[in-house]
Amino acid sequence: MGKERINQCFNEKLEAGHNLFVPYIMAGDGGLDILEERINFLAQSGAAAIELGIPFSDPVADGPTIQAAGTRALKNGTSLGAVFKTVAAIKENHSVPIILMTYINPIFTYGIERFAKDCANAGVDGVIIPDLPMEEEGMVASSLTENDIAFIRLVAMTSPTERIVAIAKRSEGFLYAVSVLGTTGARKAHSNDVKAYLKILKEHSSVPVLAGFGVSSVEQAQDLSTNCDGVIVGSKIVELLHEGKDAEVRKLIQGSVMEEVSSS
């Protein structure tokens, strides 16, 4: 579990010549009772890990699609405690790493040490906290380390090179490279500066580098993956699952992980 499981699963994919693909889903969107089914479906489709969002009333990094999913989840009564209970109940039924994406406020309210321990007990392998800056991360880092939970850092294109390098060297599990300016959501294209930015991260990161924010197609995933180890896709996955388009989700994942885009 924890850092070791992420490292093992990612290395197996990379050694097989595959790009890494991490889909994001919102816990409780459609109900927590379908969470196990969705995790297994995504894993069987080729996901290297599952990023599981915790619904929050003020999701500052999320675009409209994921905000809407969070609102639906909150209306379903989804809470951090309920997510832990559900994930713990199904942890023996899958082998794909589970990574929680949540904000610092829910963690602080829940209790930092309690949060880290419940992550470990539930079989959570990593945590992403998008609104926690490097200067403040000490409040959670030690608790996550004590419980063998990978602390996955985000790095932004707008940061100075010195800061980018510092964050790259700290990240565990993988480095989350924000590849657009702004919130999550599908984009038609990424800027030419992204490739140079990803190359810098690859030079300084000891863990895989994954590009996220704005990735919505096989072509974008393939293009970005030429300069890093893979992608994270949230809004498009959330949208397709909400619309019941599972076949399109599978096609997106399978097309993205292969070295060349399939013509089929």
Image (cartoon, grey):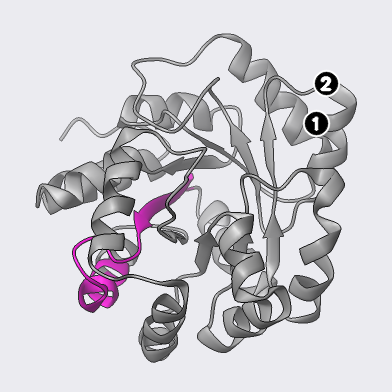
Q: Is residue 255 visible?
A: no
> Number of callouts in the render?
2
Q: Which residue is mark 1?
A: 164
Question: Which residue is depicted at the point 9% across and 52% down?
Answer: 244
Q: Amino acid at mark 2?
A: Pro
Residues 62 and 5: in front is 62
As measured in the structure, the alpha-carbon distance from the residue carrying label 1 to the one carrying label 2 is 6 Å
The answer to whether residue 175 shows anywhere in this view is: yes
Front residue of this view, candidates 12 and 161: 161
72 on left or right of 180: left
Determine which quarter of the picture holds residue 175.
top right
Quadrant where the image shows the N terminus? bottom right
Q: Measured along the vertical axis of the image, is residue 86 above or below residue 43?
A: below
Q: Position of residue 99 (x, y in %)?
A: 53, 64
Quarter of the image for the C terminus: give it.
top left
User: Does 31 lie within the magenta span?
Assistant: yes
- Label 1 sits on a secondary structure element that is helix
Number of other residues with Cα within 10 Å of mark 2, as a class: few under 14, some 14 to 19, many 20 or more: few
Q: Residue at x 47, y 46 (%)?
A: 58
Find out whether the residues at labels 1 and 2 contact each other: C-beta distance under 8 Å.
yes
Residue bearing mark 2: 160
Q: Quadrant of residue 229?
A: top right
Left or right of 236? Residue 181 is: right
Mark seen at residue 195: none
Seen in the image, is 33 located left or right of residue 188? Answer: left
| Segment colored magenta | 18-40
Badge 2 marks a residue whose secondary structure is loop
The residue that appears at 18% across and 44% down in the rendered structure is 240
Where residue 10 sits: x, y (%)?
A: 57, 59
Left or right, 109 with respect to 21, comes to right
For badge 1, the amino acid type reads Ile
